[in-house]
Image (cartoon, coloured by chain):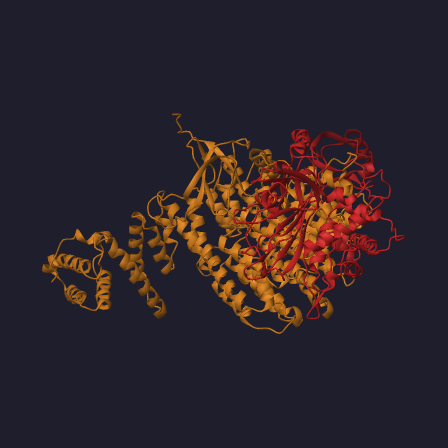
Chain colours: A red, B orange
Amino acid sequence: MLTVSVKWQKKVFKSIEIDTSQPPYVFKAQLYELSGVPPERQKIMVKGGLLKDDADWSTMRLKNGQKLMMMGSADEVVKAPEKGPVFMEDLPEEEQDANLGYSAGLVNLGHTCYMNSTMQCLKSVPELNSELSNYQSARTKDVDQTPDMLTVATSELFSELDKSVKAVAPMPFWMELKKKYPQFAQLHNGNYMQQDAEECWTQMLDTLSQSLKAPSPSEDPDAVKALFGLNLRSRLHCQESSEESSETESVYSLKCHISHEVNHLHEGLKHGLRGELEKTSPALGRTAVYIKESLIDSLPRYLTVQFVRFFWKRESNEKAKILRKVDYPLELDIFDLCSEDLRKKLEAPRQSSSKGDDVKMTDAEGSSSGSGESSTGDQQGGALSHMTGIYDLVSLVTHKGRSADSGHYVAWVKQESEVLIS
Amino acid sequence: MAPTPDPNSVGGGAKQDEAPVKVPSKDPKKKDEKKEEDLSEEDLELKQNLELYVERVQDPNPELQRDALERMRLIGTEGDIGSWGHEYVRNLAGEIAQEYTKRQSEEAPIDDLMDLVQQIVAFHMKHNAETEAVDLLMDVEDLDLLLEHVDKTNFKRTCNYLTSAAKYLPGPDDMLVLDISYMIYMKFEEYPNALQIALFLDNTQYVKQVFTSCADLLRKKQFCYMIARHGITFDLDDEMVADDDDREALQDIVNNTKLSEGFLTLARDIEVMEAKTPEDIYKAHLLDGRASSGASVDSARQNLAATFVNAFVNAGFGQDKLMTVPSDSTTGSSGNWLFKNKEHGKTSAAASLGMIQLWDVDAGLAQLDKYFHSNDNPIIAGALLGVGIVNCGIKNDCDPALALLGDYIDKEDSSVRIGAIMGLGIAYAGSQNDQIRSKLSPILNDAKAPLDVIAFASLSLGMIYVGSCNEEVAQSIIFALMDRSEAELGDALTRFLPLGLGLLYLGKQESVEATAEVSKTFNEKIRKYCDMTLLSCAYAGTGNVLKVQDLLAQCGEHLEKGDIHQGPAVLGLAMVAMSEELGIDMEIRSLERMLQYGEQNIRRAVPLALGLLCISNPKVTVVDTLSRLSHDTDSEVAMAAIISLGLIGAGTNNARIAGMLRNLSSYYYKDASLLFCVRIAQGLVHMGKGLMTLTPFHSERFLLSPTALAGIVTLLHACLDMKPIILGKYHYVLYFLVLAMQPRMMLTVDKDLKPLSVPVRVGQAVDVVGQAGRPKTITGFQTHSTPVLLAAGERAELATDKYIPLSPILEGFIILKENPDYREE
């Protein structure tokens, strides 16, 4: 009869008696009572080896009071989950890139960067995506089928972009675009001319709004308008005659005029909403200078802002680009550009949700400023689910290059992870 | 004749060639003149000679002057040498050294010189000029004389000088010098220092002597802590400690059983117990731009990296957020992370549990147990390796690692075999355990064993017998090398065979020569690799300049493609030079040259060499160099540089390196291999949440732990060819680093070994060797209370007189004794 102590995990079982006439299995059963570890899972370490169930105690030369160590647990044995995880390394090569979390790009077909960047911007509007995917081709009575075909082409292009992980060559779309808007097919020295992204954007919205008109009047009659259109209420005021008139107009974008005082997008927008124009004054019977002050009457889900950087230099008769650096925020608050009525509507939600989860986007046609870094241009702004008047930047198109006739367009799209990529 | 006969001006005389020389010349002459009345013939001749010398002293030629002066002293008076002044004595010492070498070459007797030496040494030792005394004695090769002259006031400075001089002496003088300082320390009962030297000399007899000479149990406990830190296996016998219970308590300390507890005390004190996830380390949110936005599919490579990061960061804390999550919870059972790793990745994942439970054998075994019952071979392999890791540096009477792993060595599956073999190598590194040798040696010469099993067996044997020069193990590895086919010799893993052989001779200098001879007969594919590895291991940490030159010469050659021996040569340069600051600085400079002029295979090894030189010591210049290399066009260079950034920042939480790595992670986001290296490096930088170090040096950089160095060198050799090893399926070689992982702490304990908090000053260590007076040993210090962290190059000193530390080197565990003379103010 021997007495030993057994250390198990952090516990020590002191003075356990071993009946050396019995096989070690009996000893293990003793330990089972103490530790709850089934004998077959016990590993008992005696000097230099494990205690076997059928070992002979006498060969082990145990001493009285010796310390033994036991390893074992009643824990469940780890089992592999039935379905192992799928590893990126196992996927085919094309799919690996997709999992890095970026969407596919578009191939430049030769001076089509304006188109590509515009389409990437449009693509970043999820509502438009879903509208397009629901779009049923209605090529029936209409004489002019081009808008319809262009819309179909857009829809196809978007779905291709969703599926693909490699850059897509937007050939069919390009053909349709040229068909619908022949100005984009102009050649210059045998190449397609460089074009204006803003023009492309406007035309695209125009087309889409035509074709995406809901078939039934019960629904929102014009999806595109709901998404991008905004109403401006303008007040015309003639200083000479004190005449006043007001009108409302519906536009797809706000213009940000850039002059010497404008350092920030907000200032530019204000500037753009105020203008002077000459028109015939019924009271005076001649043309007079009217001041036009516009305020926003209704906000779209996505607000488009255009930086008006290209202008016509009268003295030299050429197009030029304004290289002034204008800051734009990632979050734009246009509250003070809104009309009284709209402000009232906005106030309540603004208080409740200081920031809200509005989505929005801005799309800027830009040029790198003198330093070549900050971008500029046509901006398109984001959605507004709870009307608060605050927009997040969703995407923008920038123009790089000094002159108005050349350069390169790049689209920057904000991802869910709050990252802008090209 | 000299004009000023004032002997007082002598002592302060600075211009020794003019005034002071003339002055003493006058003095003895006068003495001689007084005796003139009863001169014998002999004396008369002497007098004439002396007069001649005096004349010569005034000779414009300084050579002649000095010569004359010395002869005068030799022939002249035998009175108090000091009366001639300090400058004179110093001058004389120099002359004697020259004269000694001259006479040695002529085999002339030196007795008269030695008499003078006696006097000079006695003089120097009395007048705070221990360094000069030591220098003189070294010149005349009679250091034993020192023993007579040291006393309580000057022995510390003497020994300090001796031990630091040893680094610059050629063998065997260095050993002699250390021997002397050991004896001096023993003479003055400065046992901790004596023990340090005994450990340095790897002289078990001396270690024993320290124990038998000291009667105080508490002091012996302190010795045990020192031995434990050094990481050698040491068994106390009843001669050293008579009482059984005491011996058991002491052996427990040597066996490092309380290391985990101490480390956790430190962690709790610093409040870093909270487990960290790999994401906490990556800090991707600080990156702007293109950090990948939540990849939807798991990448096996990145999960593996996360496994390692998690293991390194939470090492020793016993808890993490991937592996030890309670298994019963319905959502995140611990099995889940394991199965997010692919095939061989599961080995590293299971083994990471051992790393998390590091040093806590009981808890570790309990956690690993469940994997033993898995039916998946990589998991079993990981469990085996984990057992080895958890036992790293810890010894236990029951030998749990051997008991558990022993049976798996000869299993069918080679991954399981490797797990067991590597586990044994890590758990028993430095133990020279015969039982394991008898199990592993047969594998080496088993014709049927696959190459990888043989490679790891060789490596483990090298670790277990590190620095032992064991003949039998050497034979087995040599035979294994000779048996390899041409194709096998080209395999990347073959490099572990010569490395295992080299580890046997780690730091043992000439002892390697016989084996090095044998290695010349190897197949030419491996011959030079073997040669370089043996040379570099044998002289690792010695600072031997001749060997550095040998290795440099090897690196200077421009080779045909396919020759790989320059890699180990470059690593060897770092290994040899790493022992002291000056050598390190010179080495960094020459490595910079190699980057510019070396071949590609040299450039690939340079970052690794830099990593070894500055391990856990992020020197700004080296960080910059590595940062530059981490963008190298050769991706192998870049990978090596990235891993090295991790090594030099290991356990420091260095913000600069962490920032660099973060940027690299976005720079290389598309390259899975480089990104893997970046992740590993990030894990290393935050190793043990910044409480650990990888440096194999300890005790104020005096001692080099052989097992720690073995672990690092193994990893570096594996890094010489990343693709097939670390980026292939042998990534678990990263766990060899565990051998070098140590808490970088200073923990004070009371006489019952319970933690005791006292104020300490921690500051940059100052080199005070050979300085006059009682210079400050640290600068720019801050006062903390223990336990404290010590960074590279830092030193601590107690800021209270209430306690007396039992070891003068305040690192690791320090026992404090109450100061009986302390009075509360």
Find the residue positioned furthest to the front. Answer: A285
Find the residue positioned furthest to the top. Answer: B825
Find the residue positioned furthest to the left. Answer: B37
x 66%, y 37%: residue: A389
Assign the C terminus of chain A to one quadrant of the image.
bottom right
x, y percentage for residue A256?
Answer: 61, 47
Up-down relation of residue B109 to residue B415 (above or below): below
The image quarter in which residue A7 lies: top right
The image quarter in which residue B412 lies: bottom right
A359 and A297: which one is in front? A297
Image-based side of B648 in relation to A360, left or right:
left
Image-based side of A1 in relation to B598, left or right:
right
Assign the N terminus of chain A to one quadrant of the image.
top right
Find the residue positioned furthest to the right. Answer: A140
x 68%, y 70%: residue: A189
x, y percentage for residue B780?
Answer: 41, 42
Mark yes or no: residue A413 visible.
yes
A169 and B58: which one is in front? A169
B495 and B206: which one is in front? B495
